Amino acid sequence: MMRQLLIAVILQILLLGGCTWIKLTEGGATVSTATEADVVNCQKVGMVSTNTKDKLVVNRSDSKVREELLVLARNEAARLDGDTIVAQGPPRAGEQDFAAYRCR
């Protein structure tokens, strides 16, 4: 009985590791991603630092971690009245920085 409970708990943790809990806000949905070359005529409105769990007992999928970091950055850029974000480097250990711009 105890072994079955342990297996059930481990399976739930593994399944949750693939879930994305961060939701894109209405404002975040209006924010696009770009490169530095795309924003030369835009106004920088701030920097956004994002972080999410990259490990829940086991390592989470890189694509899920990247997706959550991007959603967090888009949501925060909208709060700053930005409409475009540019990654300032690759994600590392569940963290990534973005510059937020107003281009439109």
Image (spheres, rainbow, N blue to C red):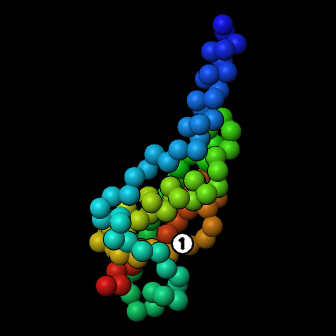
Q: In this view, does 22 lie above or below 80?
A: above
Q: In this view, does 93 lie above or below 37?
A: above
| Mark 1: secondary structure | strand
- Res. 74 image quadrant: bottom left
Question: Number of numbered discs present?
Answer: 1
Rendered location of residue 21, percent (x, y): 46, 45
Q: Please report the residue visible at 54 percent of the width from the left and 72 percent of the height from the top.
A: 87
Rendered location of residue 6, percent (x, y): 66, 18
Type of the residue with mark 1: Ala
Q: Can residue 49 be seen in this view?
A: no
Rendered location of residue 27, percent (x, y): 30, 65
- Res. 73 image quadrant: bottom left
Residue ranking furthest to the bottom: 41
Residue ranking furthest to the top: 1
Specify the quadrant that holds the C terminus: bottom left
Q: Which of 48 and 52 is in front in this view?
A: 52
Q: How crowded is mark 1: few (under 14 residues within 10 Å), some or many (20 or more)?
A: many
Q: Please report the residue visible at 55 percent of the width from the left and 37 percent of the height from the top.
A: 16
Specify the quadrant that holds the N terminus: top right
Q: Nearer the viewer, residue 3 or 93?
A: 3
Q: Say whether residue 13 is left or right of residue 26.
A: right
Q: Please report the residue visible at 63 percent of the width from the left and 29 percent of the height from the top.
A: 11
Q: Can residue 66 be seen in this view?
A: yes
Rendered location of residue 18, percent (x, y): 58, 44
Q: Mark 1 sits on what residue?
A: 87
- Res. 15 image quadrant: top right
Q: Please report the residue visible at 33 percent of the width from the left and 58 percent of the height from the top.
A: 25
